[in-house]
Image: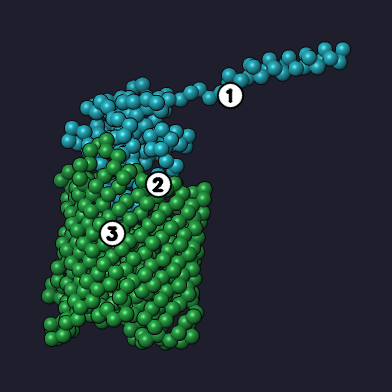
Chain colours: A green, B cyan
């Protein structure tokens, strides 16, 4: 049942429109990267991947002017095509280039642009715009829709521009390392440490972009994560992470948001059964002028999936958030769904194409909506 | 009379089948692991080999080993997946894509023709691939590291 929400159309449009400035420089940079990547491909090793998707989402809405969306950034009743363009290449086994851009009707964003130095196999120092390693969902899937089982992301790991409250990118350095990665080892520990510029707050949370970063408007973000895989050949994995972020409020000289996160995330496979989940504790302090407010909430989700004959998968997910009602930080995210229930099906049409159908119920500050989504996703080549 | 005719037909058919049978049985083909004859690689253990083709880093004598996939023969590819990777093709591809998307690196290079594969192997002593034993050219610069 859809009830009138408390969010204005103006706010909604600001949620959907990621880019406020014209990013011409971004596209010039993209063109350069394409050229460099082309040469890398010819001279060394590398490859492109395309992750196209076509999505349709719908939900009942009594008043189209008062709408915070479905909590996942979809357009209601519209067919939304999008593609994630990805390149990864190696130069002489020591240097790497990774590039990812997401293109849709409303968004053209350089997701990742990383230059890497690999002093030894399994250990790489990255520089550039990277994924913040908070949770397996953020590290593994991001805009590669085909790779994730469901259409939607868990509420706590939703993208910033779709109502997600956690910073999913940073601009700086990231070290990916392996612990005791012997050639014969069948289990493994890995870790990631990232340090860079986090987001800023301008009506909404905006991540640091390579083309328009203003050092004065961004503060450091630091994240550390450790991963354990009981079997390096399986997708089972557990991750623990901590992160500290400062988010300057741009239009207020003394405005600042401080976030401290700690979380645990897992994905476990038992033959055809997959269990996935995360718990994230967030402590925050929002300072505006002389007033500081503290908040603390815990968000979690749990997802179970069962696959028949490697083709048909049925899944269900539940997510919830504690202390969301008067949290000074979460109040800034009208499109954040503090509680979600999701069920759906995924069918592998062929080896590289999947069709997903999903029904969900998302609860917001003042209302709850039921949402239906259909998505085709694939990868090439 | 009728019984004798039936017996004769049966014997004739059986004789013909016996004669044809050896021709329709496929000769058993051996899968072999190959490198350049100039390569210093002497051995790759099954665990290392699986790791290598799963996209994980494997190094020997301070050099990174590079896997090449032989896609010239569908049956060869299936046998390789069964004996080395222990995964279905779909799952294997998914694993490679997911790994590269997450942490970078490259998927094993694929070769559609034996000729181009042989040439690529000869160019770099740290490249490793697989083929049918019968397909290893006599005059090539390849050496067999392992056979199944």
- Where does the N terminus of chain B fall, quadrant-wise? top right
Q: Which residue bears the numbered disc 3?
A: A264
Is label 1 or label 3 in front? 3
Q: Position of residue A135 (x, y in %)?
A: 29, 60
A161 vs A64, left or right, is left
- Give the Cα distance between marks 1 and 3: 58 Å
- Where does the C terminus of chain B fall, quadrant-wise? top left
On screen, residue A224 above or below A92: below
Q: How many marks?
A: 3
In this view, the residue in front, A7 or A348, is A7
The residue at 21%/74% (across/down) is A284
Q: Position of residue B60 (x, y in %)?
A: 21, 33
- Give the Cα distance between marks 2 and 1: 33 Å
Q: Which residue bears the numbered disc 1?
A: B24
**Tag 3 secondary structure:** strand
The residue at 49%/71% (across/down) is A372
């Amino acid at each position: 049942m859809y009830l009138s929400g408390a969010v204005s159309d103006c706010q909604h449009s600001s949620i959907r429109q990621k880019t406020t400035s014209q990013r011409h420089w971004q596209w010039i940079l993209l063109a350069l990267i394409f050229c460099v990547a082309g040469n890398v491909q010819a001279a060394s090793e590398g490859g492109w991947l395309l992750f196209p998707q076509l999505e349709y989402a719908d939900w009942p809405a009594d008043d189209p002017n008062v709408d915070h969306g479905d909590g996942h950034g979809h357009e209601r009743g519209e067919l939304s095509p999008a593609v994630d363009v990805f390149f990864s290449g190696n130069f002489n086994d020591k240097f790497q280039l990774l590039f990812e851009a997401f293109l849709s009707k409303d968004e053209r964003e350089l997701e990742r642009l990383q230059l890497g130095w690999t002093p030894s196999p399994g250990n790489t120092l990255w520089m550039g715009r990277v994924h913040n390693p908070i949770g397996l969902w953020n590290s593994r899937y991001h805009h590669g829709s085909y790779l994730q089982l469901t259409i939607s992301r868990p509420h706590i790991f939703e993208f910033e521009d779709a109502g997600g409250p956690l910073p999913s990118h940073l601009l700086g350095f990231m070290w990916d390392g392996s612990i005791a990665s012997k050639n014969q080892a069948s289990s493994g520990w890995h870790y990631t440490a990232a340090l860079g510029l986090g987001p800023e707050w301008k009506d909404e949370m905006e991540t640091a972009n390579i083309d328009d970063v203003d050092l004065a408007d961004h503060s450091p973000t630091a994240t550390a994560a450790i991963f354990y895989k009981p079997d390096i050949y399986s997708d089972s994995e557990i991750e623990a992470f901590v992160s500290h972020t400062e988010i300057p409020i741009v239009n207020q000289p003394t405005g600042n948001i401080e976030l401290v996160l700690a979380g645990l995330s897992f994905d476990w496979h038992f033959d055809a059964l997959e269990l996935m989940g995360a718990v994230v504790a967030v402590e925050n302090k929002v300072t505006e002028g002389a007033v500081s407010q503290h908040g603390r909430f815990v968000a979690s989700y749990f997802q179970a999936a069962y696959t028949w004959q490697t083709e048909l998968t049925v899944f269900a997910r539940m997510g919830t958030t504690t202390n969301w009602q008067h949290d000074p930080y979460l109040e800034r995210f009208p499109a954040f769904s503090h509680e979600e229930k999701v069920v759906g099906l995924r069918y592998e049409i062929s080896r590289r194409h999947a069709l997903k159908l999903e029904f969900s119920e998302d609860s917001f500050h003042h209302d709850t909506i039921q949402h239906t989504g259909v998505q085709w996703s694939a990868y090439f080549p | 009379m009728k019984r004798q005719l039936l017996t004769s037909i049966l014997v004739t058919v059986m004789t013909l089948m016996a004669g044809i049978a050896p021709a329709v049985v496929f000769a058993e083909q051996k899968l072999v692991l190959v490198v350049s004859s100039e390569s210093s690689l002497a051995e790759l253990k099954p665990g290392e080999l699986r790791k290598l083709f799963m996209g994980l880093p494997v190094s020997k004598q301070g050099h990174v080993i590079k896997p090449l996939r032989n896609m010239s023969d569908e049956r060869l590819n299936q046998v390789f997946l069964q004996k080395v990777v222990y995964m279905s093709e779909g799952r294997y591809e998914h694993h490679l894509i997911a790994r590269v998307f997450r942490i970078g690196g490259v998927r094993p290079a694929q070769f559609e023709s034996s000729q181009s594969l042989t040439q690529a192997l000869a160019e770099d002593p740290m490249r490793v691939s697989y083929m049918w034993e019968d397909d290893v050219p006599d005059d090539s610069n390849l050496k067999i590291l392992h056979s199944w």
